[in-house]
Amino acid sequence: MNDSARRRLRLLWQGRGLRSQLALAIAAVGLLALLLNVGLGITLLSRYLEDRQGQLIAAQAAELGTCCKSSSFVIVLERGPNVLANAMRLVLAGTPQRHAIIVDVRGQLLYYTPNLSSQTLRDLLGHLRGDMAALAARTSPPRWQMFHNQILAEVALFFPRQSGDTVRHVAGALLLADDRRVAGTSGAIALAAASGFAAVVLAVVGGVLAASAITRPVRALTTAARAIASGDYGRRVAPSGPAEMRRLARAFNTMVEEVVHQRAIERDLLANVSHELAAPLGIIHGYAEALSDDMIVGSEQRRAAVQAIRAETKRLSRLSGDLLDLALLETKQVSVHPEPVPVGDLLDGLSRRFERLAREAEVRLVVDAPATLPVLYTDGLRLEQVLVNLITNAIRHTPPGGAITLRLRAEGDGLRLEVADTGHGIPAEDLARIWERFYQVDKGRDRRAGEAGVGLGLAICRSTVALLGGRIDARSTVGKGTTFIINLPWRPPAT
């Protein structure tokens, strides 16, 4: 087969659907197996039938040989061919399809069944005459063999010259033969071929049914995928079919749920960004127009307007910076620079850094760290950024008189960092969503007040800790406080 023909066959195969390919593959494999089995079965069955028929001929020849050793058979031979023919017709009456040939000691033809063709008669006579010497000396039971598409049985007949003669002389030989078709091999082959054809039909039908059972869930998945691509996100696939297809359907439904969730987050992100931009831009625009139209007079009022514009500009700058950091973190476009970090010294430094802010909020800041720890290799700058964010949130949400604890422990193959406060706590329904962008537990808080965030800090913390090869979790009880737990490996994963 040339390349062009192979290419056409490949295109023809690839152009068919999965159901057709499976059905054809199953049918082809089944057909090949059936052909091998039918061929082997026909061979074995033909051999068995031929052996059986040969054994029957050999048994009859043996009986005739025993009979013909008596003097009575010599008398039959001496009375002429008509008497011999009548005697053989009586002997072969139960097997009309059987051929018989009798020759004398010189190989002269004494009798043959009239239904033998001249060519077959010549062939068998030549075979029998050539074996006369061997027949005279043979003492083994009659043998049978294939000869010119015949099943043959041969026997040497020892005819005593007279009764009581101790020396036996070969007086003649008898040959029995059956046409090979008598053994029933043709019918067996036809039956085997018919059963093989029926089995092939059943294999094709079974292949089509099996392919349909396999491809039905695939078609359902295809239909659902097209519906979702067109915007119908309510479409789901019922798990059915083989175990692999059920797992695929469940994975598909999980993927759709995640897509729906991500789209909801994207819509919320767009709405929140628009909201976060609208407020400061409105303030800046209003104060700018008032200043340009000389509606604000007096140095104190003008100074207050400029400070407001500066504060909102700072807020916009922080928002754009947080969005850029989050985008870079989530797309893995931020590099990590591991270095030996003395975490205990880092916590002491952060405690001194936030001491004034904590004192103003009337909150105690406590460091709980062992004296010695293994060396932590990580990006110290990014770890500090995470801790600053968590400490700032803790101070903001802890009422006067409360405490914030920075706890450090070596645990297994990594380090455990905790930032625990005694603040208001986070409700259970909000705890799972605090990592979402722009999500705010306190929905009524004025984001323009002071240093209020915009809901990106915890999302940045989670992405940063993941970049460092760690994990961050939160536990909280309403009215008792919140604990953020960071687990970091002693060395960051290889990138």
Image (cartoon, rainbow, N blue to C red):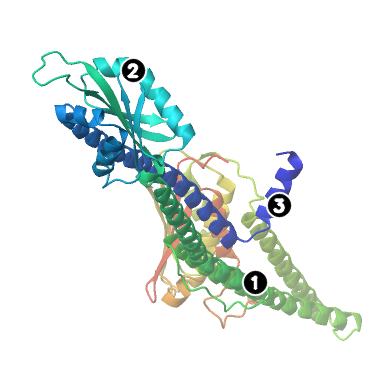
Mark found first going from the N terminus, 3 or 2: 3
Number of residues whose C-alpha sits closer than 10 Å to that of mark 2, classed few (under 14), some (14–19) or many (20 or more): few
Give the quadrant of the C terminus. Answer: top right
Residue 235, image x, y percentages: 57, 77
Q: Residue at x 42, y 73 (%)?
A: 425
Three-letter code for the amino acid on which mark 3 is drawn: Leu
Q: In this view, does 384 lie above or below 153?
A: below
In this rendering, position of residue 63 left or right of residue 283: left
Residue 231, image x, y percentages: 66, 77
Q: Which of marks 1 and 3 is in front?
A: 3
* Residue identified by numbered label 1: 226
Residue lying farthest to the left in this orientation: 164
Give the quadrant of the N terminus. Answer: top right
Residue lying farthest to the bottom in this orientation: 295
Q: CB of mark 1 within 8 Å of CB of mark 3?
A: no
The answer to whether one can see residue 454 in this image is no
Q: In this view, does 312 lie above or below 379?
A: below
Three-letter code for the amino acid on which mark 2 is drawn: Arg
Q: Which mark is residue 11?
A: 3
SS label for mark 2: loop
Q: In which quarter of the image is residue 380?
A: top right
Residue 424, image x, y percentages: 43, 75
* Residue identified by numbered label 2: 106
Q: Which residue is drawn at 43% across and 72% down?
A: 423
| Distance between the alpha carbons at the discs numbered 1 and 3 | 25 Å
SS label for mark 1: helix
Residue 455, image x, y percentages: 59, 70
